[in-house]
Image (spheres, coloured by chain):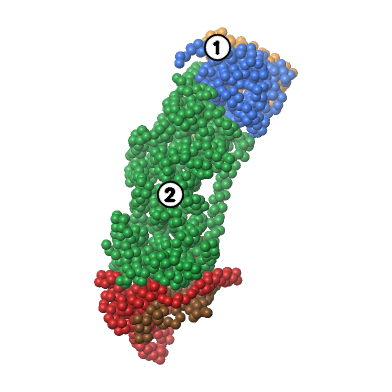
Chain colours: A blue, B brown, C red, D green, E orange
Amino acid sequence: MSFDWMKIPYALLTVFIVFNYGLLLGAFIQKIGARAGRRYGIPVWQNYVDLIKNYGQRTSITHGVMFYLGPVFRLTGGIGLLLFVPTIYGSYMFSNLSFAGDLILALYFVFFGTLGMALGAGESGHPHAAIGITRGLSQVSVAELPFALAVFAVALQYQTLSVTDIVAAQQGGVLNWTLFTNPLAVAAAMLAFLGSMMRPPFDVVIAPQEIPIGPPTEYHSAYLALMQTNRAIFPVAKMVIYMNLFFGGATSWPEFAVKVFLLYLFSAFVGVCFPRFRVEQSIRWFLIWAVPLGVQAILWV
Amino acid sequence: MISLAQMAMAAGFVLILIGFYGALTQRNLLRMIVAFSLANTGVHIVLVAVGHMRGRTAPILDAAVPVADALTRVIDPVPQALVLTAIVIGLGVTALMLAYALKLHARKHTLDIAKMTELKW
Amino acid sequence: MIKRAIALLLTLAVGALFASLLVGYVPDSELNHTARYYAERTAEDIGAANIVTAIIVTYRGLDTLGEVTVLFISAAIVGLVLAQGRVLNNAPNNAPRQTRAPVSELLSTGSRVLTPLILLLGVYVFVNGHLTPGGGFQGGAIVASGMLLLLLADPLKQFSHRLIAVLESLSGLLFVGIGVLGVLLAGGFLDNRLLPIGTLGELFSAGVIPVIYSLIGLKVGAEFSSMLASLSETNHTENSEET
Amino acid sequence: MVSALHIITAALAAAFLLGLLKEQQRGLAYGITLLTLALMSWISAGWLWTFASTGTAAVEIFTAGTEPPFAINLRIGLAEAALTLLINLVGLLSALALKDTLLALGRRAMAVWLVAVMALSGIVLTRDLFNLFVFFELTVIASAGLVLLSEHAKNDGQALAAGFKYLIVSQFISAFLLIGIIFAYHATGTLNIDDMAAAAPLLGGGAAQAFALAFFLIFIAVVAELKPFPANGWALDIYESAHPAFSALFSAATGAAALFAVDKLLLIGGDAWLPMATGIGIVTFVAANLLALPQTNDRRLLGYSSIAQTGLILAVLGQRDILGEHTLYIAGGLLLSHAIAKAGLYWLSGLIAERGLEAWAALRGQPLLIFAFVSFISMLSGLPPFPGFYAKWELIHLLAGEGRIVLLGLILFGALLEAGYLFRWFGYIMKREAPTEVVDNVAHKFGAVFATLAALAAAWALSLVWGELAGLQFDRFNMLLALPLLFALAFLLLDWLPVWVKNSLAIAGLLAWFYLTYTEYDPLRMIFAVIFLIGGSLTLLASYHEHGRRIGFYPSAMLMFAGLAMLIRATDSFDFFVAWELLTVGSYFLILRGKHSEPHALSYILFSLGGAFLILAGFALATQGAPYFDLAALADLVQPLAPWVFLLLAIGFMTKTAAIGLHIWLPGAHAEAETDVSPMVSGILLKAGLYGLIVLLLTMGRQDFYGVELINAMLWIGALTALIGNLLAIFQEDAKRLLAYSSIGQMGYAMFGLALMNHLGWLMALMFVINHYVYKSMLFLSVGGVAKRTGTRQMYRMGGLITLMPLSFIATLIGIIAVSGVPPLSGFGGRWIFYNAILTAEARLPMILIFLAGPIAFLYLFRLIYTIFLGQLKDEFRRVKEAPFWIVLPQMIYVAILLVVAVVPGLVLRHVDAYLNHFFPNGGLIWEGTTITSQFGYWNPVAIMIIVGVIFMTLFAWLLFVNRRAQKVKQFNIVFSAERPFRPETTHFAWNFFAPYRKALGFLTLPLVTLFWSTMTDLLHTAGDLARRFYTGNGQTYAFHLLAFVVIVYLFGMGVRP
Amino acid sequence: MEQELKPELQKRMVKGPDGVEFEVEPLRDYYCEALPTVQHGAYFKIVEDFFNWARAQSLWILGFGTGCGAIEMRPLMTPRFDAYRYGIQWRPTPRQANLLVISGYLSVKTLKRAIRAYEQMQSPKYVVGLGSCTINGGMYWDSYNTIKRLDDYMPVDLYIVGCMPRPEALLAGFEDLKKLIRAGKAEGANQYAEKFDWYKSNQKRVIHDWDMPDYNW
């Protein structure tokens, strides 16, 4: 099999677009949050400035090899996730590197960054980092469940694990979206989505004063910058999956932008309206409200 | 009609039962040994009684019982032979029990069987 | 009380078992084939007038050997049991044993007169075992009763354990030896035809039966005596130990 | 040929001769005694040789020059010769062991000893009923006397009391016996056993009734000599108080003789009496084993065991109607096993100063004696290659063939109980504090040691013979001579060599065996062969780190490997089961080597044996009477039977894979095992269970059990196991326990995959087999290495070891990435196949469970690596070194394997995939270039590896560049709310790591299963403890028991008889 | 007047799992002993200017409140003042903050924490003193327990006067700080490294229970 080398610049282009979009989107969402609190909010370019500043820090410390590798794992996870899923349906340019694997690959690659980050934070030796990780892992292990169930329901529904094929099956009108053909699965997945976005009510993982922002508590300078980069890419990559699976995918960048924005907005809305859950509360919440939906989805496909 | 043999046998069985009952209820070693002797005697009586045949005589060939008549004149000799063995064996056991009782008494200063229960469970 | 009730119940249950045996018992009117064989063939094959003796010594000789062995080991065990805790080689036994009152003249003399007679009777009984009711065991018991008399008369009397042991062993050994000779020279183990059968009813008849019975008599006598001796001796020593 | 009669005459002559000696000539007397016993043994041995080699018929010995039935006759045949040889040899060896006592007590004791042995031979030889009685009485009297042999040393009157109790009971017995004999004589007119047997069936009407009653009395009296439950308190007291050498005789020889007497009696009584024998036997077997559970006195325990074994053999005799010509082989096998083992154990007991079971720890340091002990308890438990194994195999098969399921179940249950207390005892020996009073000078106890070793030799010789007999019977090769087993046993002889030599030999052996056999395996078996043999030798590399001799390790390990090697080659049920038992036993010994593994090894062997018994029952049910069958024939089973067989086999195999409910043995066993043993038992041994399941599912497939699809049940079990295993793992503080629970979870996945019963499910299961071997071995090794260096397995006590043990860290890192299934390592392949597989399955609910189980794995894996290698380094570990080279080396090899398999999974999977097409033609994978395509999705491991690698390396380089001047700081250079950490111990967040999880889902981890099993065992134990109070120690009570026994058997037995 | 170290920081003998004893000296073994060095900016001035612009636009304040001023900081987060719109935000960890606001009088005890927090920040980093207490001790000028002049202990880039200054004053002060940063005049971290000995001796003079390494990385 010959490899099409043009895929590499195309992929880089995707990363570049998504990165910028992610940075802006993040700021925008923050602004919306601020407006909900009747503040003006940060400038939309603030994320760029912060990123530059962090790259420009003059000193840094290191706790060891894994401390280095943590952010690398993290960002690799984000970029990889983005690249393993086609961003724009029907576009050869933005089908990225999805030839390497299907939905399962994407789902499991989500954990690549998580695990690496956890290791890096662990190496810092900071107990708060470890506490944050236990909270994060505990919460995500349950929050991912309804998502996995929903994904599985969708895979069963379309009898394929290929993201492209799933998107293809949803073409031809809004009513073909999984949102309407399998609402239970979408409901379960969207609840899981809330849990994976680290926004209220599920953000006790990074409780800023109790365990100063949890896992990244020791990270700074360029490490932090790398993580900020990921923070721009990863949620979008994740939302791309959601979009592809449940909302008909995107055939063009504008459609992509709108759908991702709306998805992000959903979690932001919930976030500004609800207070924080403790970890065990969120575990129970997912098990009681989200998982049964996923179970129903699987059973009724 | 109840024959002599049956009467003897009944008596033997009763003796055995008395012996058994005594062995089960008497806690004194010596009394138990006596009870067993009683039961043994009962067994022996039963043994002999089984071999008894009405109107016949002891299986000794002498002037009274010529060899030719032996078949019709003598009783079954086998139980007689057996009972002898049984008696002797019973005797041996009894002697042994007595010796044990003696020794047990010397050791524990009691003849109460209920007090010899160090080994249990 | 409950114990007695249970004991009664169990005894009654066993009694019921026996009762059914008793009810089911029908006395034979004829000899069964085994008994018939003995009645018919004893005189001819064994030559013993007393069929029971023939059975005991020859036909069921192995039983009798066992019987003798029972007595033998009983005596041995009694000896063992009672010897335990006692100083072995009971040599220094003079001082404490003289505490009892001396035996009365009447008793000792009487017993001394009677004992040989009793012994003689015993010997008679076992020598004639193949002819008359009686035999080695009976004779042996009589012999032992002579010993008992001596002991009763003089509780402190000492028997030679050595003598008794030799007697006992020798007779036992001979018994086995004769039995084995039967295998070699006659029809099988304990076959009495090692010696000529002789004439029915005579003293020297029935092959080796009289010999065996005599040996049995000696052996039984010796064994009983040894048991008696052991029992009587122990009593003294144990009592003295206690005080 | 010397007549067998001279066994009796020689003994008597010698006994009488002893009387002629002077009291002081004790040495001479002892010499005569030994010579006579040797002569007796020689006579029986000669006969045994004659019968065995020529196969001539039994020889009659007449006495009094008269034919039976008029005179007493004796008979010697094969069985008689064997039994008399057994009796005489036990007599001889016991006399050796009794040397001190006999010399102290003098000629009378020796005479009694001779008579006792003679009488036992007499019981065996005689064919006359009354003669039997005489010999019985002789036995009784002699035994009552010999009980006192121990009085010589202890002098506490206990033996006296025991002897008296025996005499009391024997009085009752002899009364019944005599009355029975005389009435039987009256009814049949004969005393000869054969004559009576011929006459009895001809009786009619009242005579038959009377004879039946008389026979009942005889029968019950002789059976009472077998110490049936409950009329056996006296016997226990004797066992407890008597001299062990006598107990050896009493247990081995008396039991054998009495059993033979019962056999003779059953000849008279006929088949009608068999149920009664069976009933008494089986009740005794189960009850005695139950009562033995709470015993603490070794000799009493052995007494209970003797009684139980006798009961079992009685039950076997009672099954003669269906066992037919096999009776001799079965009963003989059981009897000889019991006799030799019990005699050996009693002789061993003579070497132990104290009577508690724990006191046997004194044996430690005497490898030969321990080997003897092991051989004996294996013999008693019916493990291969001992005769009891063959006997049990045949017995169970024949019983199953006839549908006597209840009896079969009771026998297996009783055997399990027995194995329970025997192996618990072995655990005490190996693990308990040795008493201050160590074994007396072995040279001093030469007799007992010699006797024990003789028994040991006899045990192995017998297993050879029984194997040969089995060979003749089923036309197969002697199992004991199988090359792997011989190889394993050879290590017993080589145990004096240093570790490195033995280890090299072991590795060479495994590889050589693989080389010899690799052509035989189909791809499926090849996977297991590679894991068992190649994988085994890889794991063994780690064993090079040990120094010294490591006594006992190699025989155990190689036994396990021999079992594994034989397992994959087995084509029929017999071979399979043998291999199964061997690997179970071998691994048990391996596990027991761990420092604190005593209770866990016990629960392991109990669960394993329980499982093995289920497998045995399943095989037996499946064959329907045939001695064994081709495993492939399982496929031919049909409806009413098939689901049962499936159920039994599946549960049996699932005990090995530690399915939920049967899993409680695993964590302790794997965690407490030695560093290099854990990977063996986890990485390799667990696969044996999976192999079993694979064989089962390949042949039997789907089975419907009262409307329940069994495969679906297995699906649920697999999912639950995965979930609970993973969930429990996250709450463990002990690193190896965590890994052990993780294994449970992983096995759950594999079971789930198999139960899917489709192409991809199986492929996934096999992928798990391979992956689990690699990464679990690696993780156990690295964690084991860390534990070895730090001296603890508690993770919260470790921390920050990454810089000190970097290689172990790398292995763990790679391992957890692989376990978690995160791309790009090989674990992902498993997950990918897994998801594809479940897409095709119908059962969706269990999938949900398994989904939940997935992410939980991250929790425990992170905990493992974080709490050990990351976080804060503790003071005491600041100077810890990297794990020993030989422990690290295999880890690095595993790392390499993982990486290779990650990139080219097709290396192995392709072939398996193709092979699976035979069974599941649909749903295979398409291998195209580097892409693997399934019905639903696709996967390109090479591309993934490259993409991830490139991104990763680019980012890493970039970060390194940006941070080129980063200051390396130390462990307390952390922001701590403007404070400083107190100490590393208080700063390392590790204990109760997932506290919130426990709050939310902790209820799922309630130890319900443990509670269930411990309640079960407690119940059994308590039942035994309460029931044994029934033996009050009062001789009179024992008499009550006896009479009650007679009455009850009478009511039950005669009541239902026609 | 050297004070004895706290027990957990004292040298101690520890026995390893292999039974060998060795010495652990917490201050040496647990803490990095390196001292700060002067950090130069980017090689090209334009790049450095760019970075300085970004630094100025992204002031991350360490959430560290001392004295009365802490209460004046809070309103900055509220809708009324909303400092976020100026690129100012609070970070909970010194690693990620680049601005330390000493919001009022500083007791000796708190000084130690402040120093630690300051040293754990990554350079370039800025210090702003709030209120007169940080300038000359203010109303606590004769207190036995507070420091008088913050400048003696850490390089202050900017003081905001008042007792206390209002939030509006704070905003104005931050804007001034931004100007300083953009101008490249806020090099407190380098100053601290250059005059490290002087700062240290000042610090140690008032902090008697000095139980940390000289520089907290």
Picture coordinates of residue A140, whole percent (x, y): 60, 29
Residue farthest bottom in this picture: C106
Q: Is residue A49 visible?
A: no
Give the residue type at disc 2: Trp
Residue matched to label 2: D393
Give the camera-side residue of D321 and E213: D321
Picture coordinates of residue B95, whole percent (x, y): 43, 75
Q: Is residue D996 visible?
A: yes
Give the camera-side residue of E102 and C23: C23
Task: Rate crowding at label 1 as few (under 14), some (14 to 19) or many (20 or more) other CA atoms within 10 Å.
Answer: some
User: Disc 1 vs disc 2: which is toward the camera?
Assistant: 2
Residue found 34% across the figure and 68% down from its top = D73
Q: Is residue B65 left or right of residue A210?
A: left
Residue found 65% across the figure and 31% down from its top = A292
Residue matched to label 1: A93
**D780 is higher (above) or lower (below) than D180:** above
